[in-house]
Image (spheres, grey):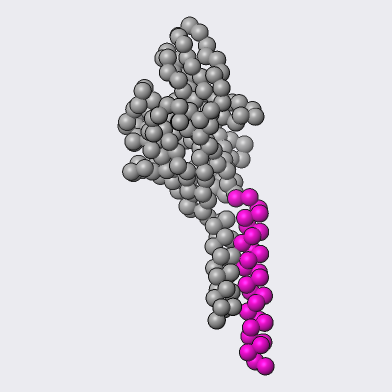
Amino acid sequence: MKKTLLLIFMVAAGVALCVTGAWAYQFNPTTEVEAYQYSGVSSYPGWIGWFPVIASSGDNNFNIQGANLVGSNLEIFTSWPGATVGDLGAVAADLFLYSAGQSWAVRLSNTSGQMGGLFINPTYNNPISYFSSTGYIYGGAYDEANPQPVPVWANGSPIGYQAVTWGTGVVEVSLAGITGFNIGDFSFIYPSATCANSVLIGSVPLPPSVLLLGTGLLGLALLGFPRKRRASQL
């Protein structure tokens, strides 16, 4: 009985891991960004150190808990209040996507009535240019080993619109139907708000090791069934 239950568990685990690798992904947040202190309109900011801006600001609105990709829908779990709510001059940032040598952005705020607006290969503002006339502390770059300005706002006009739905603690973005976009092989950046105080970075597909684990468990389980059947026939 115990061996039968173990085999059933291994089959279930193997199938779950294999299927998960094909259609569902989970992403953990990357919350550390290089921070800038902008001191005035006529001067440029300087680095003030690599540290988690969230903990320093004390403002939980910027927190990102993670994201799930299920089918063609990306669910981002965020404390940001919604598409039309601003905080300290910030609004919900755009979602930036990269696939097959191209880039896209999807507008997640309702600024200018463009929520869901799709931009292809856009130029963009980073937090420095977006807040160039303020004195706020805000996120400036991601990737400690190779700091780069965080894209937060696509410039230009939308070429189309994607479905974007804000709920309590989550925003769901449909990635279906984007011409040239490969839902099975892409990366993304979402910086929570235009101040980029919390940055979520993810990529698809899952590491091959996860898929190998799933197929390995499935294979071991299937090998066990013929042995059990032969033993019962003796």
Give the image location of residue 149, x and y in percent.
Answer: 55, 24
The boundaries of the magenta stretch are: 206-234
Residue 26 shown left or right of residue 113 in the figure: right
Residue in view at x 59 percent, y 65 percent: 14
Quadrant in which the N terminus appears: bottom right
Query: Measured along the vertical axis of the image, is residue 205 above or below residue 5?
Result: above
Query: Measured along the vertical axis of the image, is residue 225 above or below residue 148?
Result: below
Residue in view at x 34 percent, y 27 percent: 86
In this view, the residue in front, 204 or 46, is 46
Quadrant in which the C terminus appears: bottom right
In this view, the residue in front, 144 or 170, is 144
Residue 226: name its quadrant.
bottom right
Can residue 142 be seen at all in this image of the molecule?
Answer: yes
Can residue 161 be seen at all in this image of the molecule?
Answer: no
Query: Measured along the vertical axis of the image, is residue 137 above or below residue 102?
Result: above
In this view, the residue in front, 9 or 130, is 9
Please say whether residue 217 is one of the residues in the magenta stretch.
Answer: yes
Residue in view at x 52 percent, y 23 percent: 35
Residue farthest along the bottom direction in this orientation: 234
- Dominant secondary structure, magenta: helix
Give the image location of residue 64, x and y in percent.
Answer: 45, 38
